Image (cartoon, helix red, strand yellow):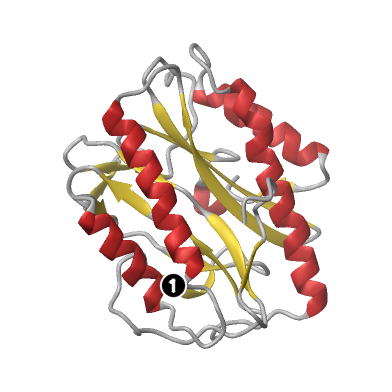
Amino acid sequence: MGIVIKNAEQIQGIRDSSRLAGKTLLMIAEYVKEGVSTAQLDKIIEEYIRDNGAIPAPLNYNGFPKASCISPNNIVCHGIPNDKTILKPGDILNIDVTTILEGYYGDTSKMFTVGDISDKAAQLIENTKHCLNLGIAQVQPNNSFGNIGFAIGRYAKAKKYSVVYEFCGHGIGLEFHEEPQVEHTARRNSGPRMKPGMIFTIEPMINVGKPKVEIDQFDGWTARTIDGELSAQFEHTVLVTETGVEVLTDVSGEY
């Protein structure tokens, strides 16, 4: 099928869905605190998305049982919200939400913290956010998709982190996952070239230890670091414009 160039109507629909996804992460922040279960957070997220006329894309996607992915500490991604995971001081967690509004998809995630966290965790979060920003800075017409991963990988390696290579960003908007795959570690100038109207996610997962993950054999989803070390992730949905980039899930005016 190739990489879909979205038309103006589609871009506006994806923009609206992306804004709702971003607003969902802003909304949930006040509930992320000690003693709350990840299942409680998921319930609040689902109700907010539905109250705003949308549906949560992860729910029942290939059998995924919840409305969001919540991944604490050494869980890299696809953590399943549950009643047994109770937030405690020192925890860091990624909350990943994808909305379907009027048939259009928006996808974003960010890190949250509970109480005082370690310096190691704080530095990981800060550097992972910088990795995302470096990736976004590469988004412009005619640039190669590989330069996103090249910029992220070079910085992460310089900071003595590893980049998860088993999961990547992806085209999005009309479907949950579209072409292309957006690698977070790649060769310079590799891959297809960006064109105005392309929409995709950049979502680097950065580990303190080794890059490899292991998938939980019982639930088939939860991806953990193989060495138990911390992992962090940030994600935005971005649009290639005629002159550069629009960060569709940015609702705080950061970009």
Q: Secondary structure at mark 1?
A: strand
Q: Out of 3 and 137, give the one closest to the viewer.
A: 137
- Left or right of 13? Residue 139 is left
**Where residue 56 sits in the image (x, y, percent)?**
66, 46
**Where residue 34 sits in the image (x, y, percent)?**
48, 13
Q: Residue at x 38, y 40 (%)?
A: 125
**Where residue 69 sits in the image (x, y, percent)?**
50, 41
- Left or right of 55? Residue 140 is left
Q: Relative to 251, is 190 above or below?
A: below
Quadrant the C terminus occupies:
bottom right
Circle 1 is placed at which residue position? 181
Quadrant the N terminus occupies:
bottom right
**Where residue 210 sits in the image (x, y, percent)?**
17, 48
Q: Out of 93 and 47, give the one closest to the viewer.
A: 93
- Left or right of 184? Residue 62 is right
Q: Relative to 111, is 114 above or below?
A: above
Q: Residue at x 29, y 28 (%)?
A: 119
Q: Residue at x 30, y 24 (%)?
A: 118
Q: Residues within 10 Å of mark 1 (few under 14, many from 20)?
A: some
Q: Out of 95 and 112, give the one closest to the viewer.
A: 112
Specify the quadrant of the image occupied by residue 104. bottom right
Specify the quadrant of the image occupied by residue 18. bottom right
Q: Is residue 203 visible?
A: no
Q: Out of 15 and 176, give the one closest to the viewer.
A: 15
Q: Is residue 114 visible?
A: yes
